[in-house]
Image (spheres, rainbow, N blue to C red):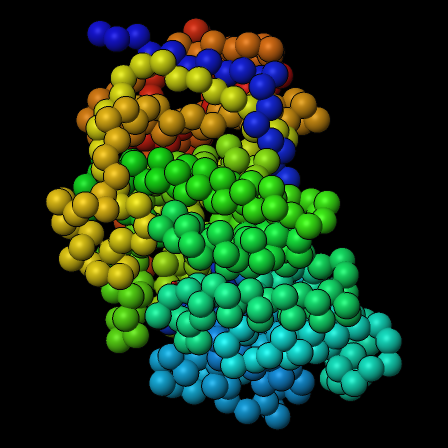
Amino acid sequence: MRTCELFILADRVLGPVEGPLWGQFIEFVGRCIHGGIYDPGSPAARSDGVRADVLEAMKELRPTHLRYPGGCAVSYFDWQELVGPRAQRPPAKLYRYTGVPQSTAFGLPEAFAYAEELGAELYLTVNAHTQSPEDAANLVEYLNGTTRTRWADLRRSHGREKPYGIKRFGLGNEIYGDWQPGQKTAEEYVRWCREAIRWMKAVDPTMSIAAVGMGRPGPDWDRTVLKGLIDSIDLFSVHNYCGRPVFRDCMAASRVYETMIEWANVAIDEAMDTRLSRKERPGIALDEWNVWYRARHAAEASLEEIYDYTDALTVATLLHVVLRHTRTVRLSNISLAANTCGSIFTDRQRCVRQTIFYPQMLFREKHTGEAVQTFYDGPVFPAKHERYFCGIVDVEKAKDETLPTLLHFDDLDALDALCTVDRGRRRLSLSVVNKLEDRALTARLSFRGIEPRSTLVRVYRLTGPSLQAANTLDHPSQVGLVSAWDRVAGSFPFPAASLTLLEFEI
Ligand code: AHR
């Protein structure tokens, strides 16, 4: 049998694990906000309408920030409809998409308060469709203005003297696509953004701004947008949803994400070569990502996924990608927080932590400090994956094995490892996904540049009765985490289709 070895190269730092890497996305879509995190009719709601049980679960995820209010929803986000006394707010045209007027009760002040309770920042997307660059600047003035101006005074008249101090803004959402109300050409978008950035930064020059990128399939969009905005943006936003109905193919999704990040970095570098000023190189915002291939991307469907054990493994591998690339991926949001692709799932009375909740919670807690290089030597396997948004556009497509757009990989590492070293906490955390469906692997662990203090380790494992096991409202605890002390005597066993995190003292 082939030997299997994992090298941990502690001196080869990949990047810091800091900043807005642990974002949650709360959007006016499906039951994410209404009926999810906010549901005044629920017996589990507090007097302000916030679901206490959902908030508790969100607290366990410890998000660094919340992206709000969209997504596609942002194209009808008229910010003036979402501020001021709740009773006087009109029903918003916010999500005309659904054809249903939306409540405005969970508006900007409520989203801000929600984020504050979580110890998180608010990351706002602005409407690049029905609102003008000036509206975006007015919003910044309303939120952050310190002088006596019309919009800052409006905030004061709403009972808030202190500026909100919101520092992260995204300009529109997926506006290259025909599903996004207000689709624009790259040139039109650049024009809108240049104006908006100019006026927004005139009000508050300290903010960070993300522009819409497309990622792998849209080189022309990406080149045009980056060329036009390289001197004025801080982040270049890309989205991707993944998953296929075949286990091994799900395990290839992380490779697609690596490819997408590589591509975005090439595009950013190309634009940097033509830059006019010496502005810092923009980073990548992995603004929306998750497993999403079963539910239809159509208004009449609920866009809700019931995640299984396999999906939790996929999410773990995608988090590995984020953590491996923090030198360039500066912001990340899993999409979304509740119900629609939600890490948390609810009905009126109950709330359940879906399977994908657990790798997020575990990594947020244990992966701190710096990500360091690992090197794997052992079995590889073949698999394929769509390079970009697959099932959500056409569910049947996700099942098609013959699509020319499938990327084929022959050499996927059976063990996918991510290691962080936190010298302050004297901790080394090594998470490993065994991507083989039916073969356990025992790997020799070889440390370079660091030596654990003891062979005694704390071991965390994702558990579940089968690859298809899900946490449902009726069976909320099928998949979860267990932990125990164990010894690493040179090598360590990784069960088939598993997630294990080893916590060493250093
Ligand atoms: O989150 C659901 C939708 O998926 C978002 O609105 C959009 O940005 C993406 O296509």
Q: Looking at the picture, how far across and down is residue 465, in whole percent?
A: 24, 38
Tell me if residue 318 can be seen.
no
Q: Is residue 402 above or below residue 142?
A: above
Give the quarter of the figure containing the C terminus.
top right
* Along the line of sight, the residue nearer the viewer: 93 or 52: 93
Q: In percent of the image, x 70 and y 64: which residue is there?
A: 166
Seen in the picture, residue 309 relative to 430 is either above or below; the reply is below
Quadrant of the rendered image holding ligand 1: bottom left
Horizontal arrangement in the rendering, residue 191 relative to residue 291 (left or right):
right
The x, y position of residue 205, in whole percent, is 77, 61
Q: Can residue 425 be seen in this snapshot?
A: yes
* Image: 60 above or below 162: above
Is 173 located above or below residue 84 in the figure? above
| Closest to the observer, 248 or 401 | 401
**Left or right position of 134 against 317:** right
For the point 15% across and 57% down, the residue is: 396
Give the camera-side residue of 130 and 357: 130
What quarter of the picture does the N terminus occupy?
Answer: top left
